[in-house]
Structures are given as structure tokens and as C-alpha cells.
Image: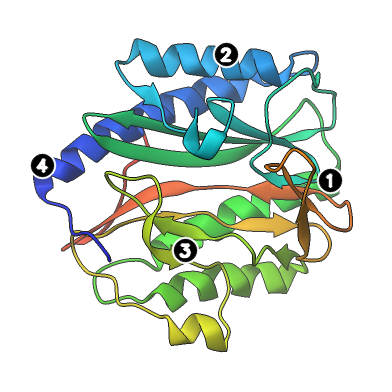
Amino acid sequence: MISIKSDAEFAAMRRAGRVVAEVLEWARTAVKPGVTTAELDAEAEKIIRSRGATPEFKGYRGFPASTCLSVNEQVVHGIPGKYRLKEGDILGFDVGARLDGFVGDAALTIPVGKVSREAQRLVDTCRECLDRAIAACGPGARLTDIGRAVQTLADERGYGIVREYAGHGIGKKMHEDPSVPNYVDSEVRRHDRTLKPGMAICIEPMLNLGGHDTKVLGDGWTVVTRDGTLSAHFEHTVAIRATGAEVLTVL
């Protein structure tokens, strides 16, 4: 069931989104060669709690950390640990925070030092896919408009679009209806919905340098590309307002 938010509820989501945005803005400069993913996670949690919020990911279905940090071929849900970042890596940095009963959720992929041209192109394209998907939102638009915006650019540039994972509704819970796929096929069309004022969704394209297939590692969380190629991930929490789409996970 899709929940419709009031202006007051959107204001709370905006506050939670700002906390997430602060963490990601800090991460842009904190991510560098030599730092471990566990160190990044610990500092991110400090920032979240210092704002009076709580890390939404920590303990979610047993997840052990405050952030999902996914390196190179890891698509999403990477568990922070002893891995020390190296020049040329790319790091998916996914953050969720709860404040005043509502959740903000966003992600970006950060190049570590100087990366290859193909890695940078993948990251840039994934970010552009997110921008185009947000631009396709608004009252009266459909979920398939979002998926088509992502798919058109990704297909044009030859990237695999992850299909097993998608964006989602968000509000008092991190994952609410509806699912927000990054592609369009007959099954996606069958579950299509019209966007209405008061809805809040997370749009999160996930693109692979190779094929779209993924698998989950033995830790039960970390999703990787099946062919071992690089993956990029970007995400924003977006409110559907009468006047258009408003990104809530910004400073």
C-alpha cells in the first residue's frame, strides 16, 4: 500500500534527508586511498548520531553496519570492514538515517583517487541516469517513465542494468510500496503506477560495466556482478509534490 505524506511529514523527511546529505558530502573528501571501509562507516555513524538521528541500516534485518559500502564489482549492500581503499577503486556509499520518525536514504559512487577512464564513464553515466529519472518524475508521470529514463541512457552507452534490485517507496519505513525498477519490460508495465502528490520514492539506478546478472556472496549481504565487472550506484529520496519532484536528500 502506497502511503501519502502531508506537508509536515515531508518536512520531517527533509530533515532526515539533510542528515544523509551531510554524510555523503563529507564522504566525497573522506574517501581516499589508505582508509578502510570500517573507518568510514564509524565516522559516518558519528555524524548521523551527532545530528540527533539514528543510522537506519544498522540492525536492519541483521545488517551489522551503519552504511553499505560497496567496492568495485560490489553492486550494493557491501559490509564495511578491514578493506583498505586503493587508488583506482570506486566506492558505492549508501546511507540511511531516521529522524523524527521518518527516513532519508541516498547513495553515490565515489572514485578513489585517479580511476580509469572506463570507471569514470560508468560513474558519470549512472549519475546522469539518476538525474534523468528525477527529471521524469512529477504528478501524472508513471513509474515506467523513471525506468525508461534510466534504461534509455544505459542501453545507449552499453551498460548492464541491475534487475534484481530496484528503488522503492519510503517514509516511516525505509522500504515501502511501490517498487521503482530501472528498466521497462512486460512485467514492469503490469505493475505500473501513476505518481501522485504526497508520494515519496527512492530512485536508485545500478549500472554494471558488463552484464546485468548479480549474485550474493557468502556473507548473505554483499551483492556483486556475476561477471566480476565494475558497478556504480546512485540514489536520492524524492518527494512528489503538486508542482513537481523535490529531492529531499540534499543540503
Mark 2 touches mark 1? (CB < 8 Å): no
Q: CA distance from mark 3 to mark 2?
A: 32 Å
Q: CA distance from mark 4 to mark 2?
A: 31 Å
Q: What residue is rendered at 28% in x and 71% in y? A: 195
Q: Earlier in the sequence, mark 3 or mark 2?
A: 2
Which mark's residue is nearer the viewer, 2 or 1? 2
Q: CA distance from mark 4 to mark 1?
A: 44 Å
Under tag 1, what secondary structure?
helix
Residue 72 lies, with reference to residue 180, above or below; the image says above
**Residue kind at label 1, given as amino acid type:** Arg
Circle 4 is placed at which residue position?
8
Q: Residue 80: x, y in percent?
A: 68, 25
Quarter of the image for residue 2 reads bottom left
Q: Earlier in the sequence, mark 1 or mark 3?
A: 1
Q: Residue 110: x, y in percent?
A: 66, 34
**Residue kind at label 4, given as amino acid type:** Ala
Circle 2 is placed at which residue position?
42
Quarter of the image for residue 156 reads bottom right
Which mark's residue is nearer the viewer, 3 or 2? 2
Q: Earlier in the sequence, mark 4 or mark 1?
A: 4
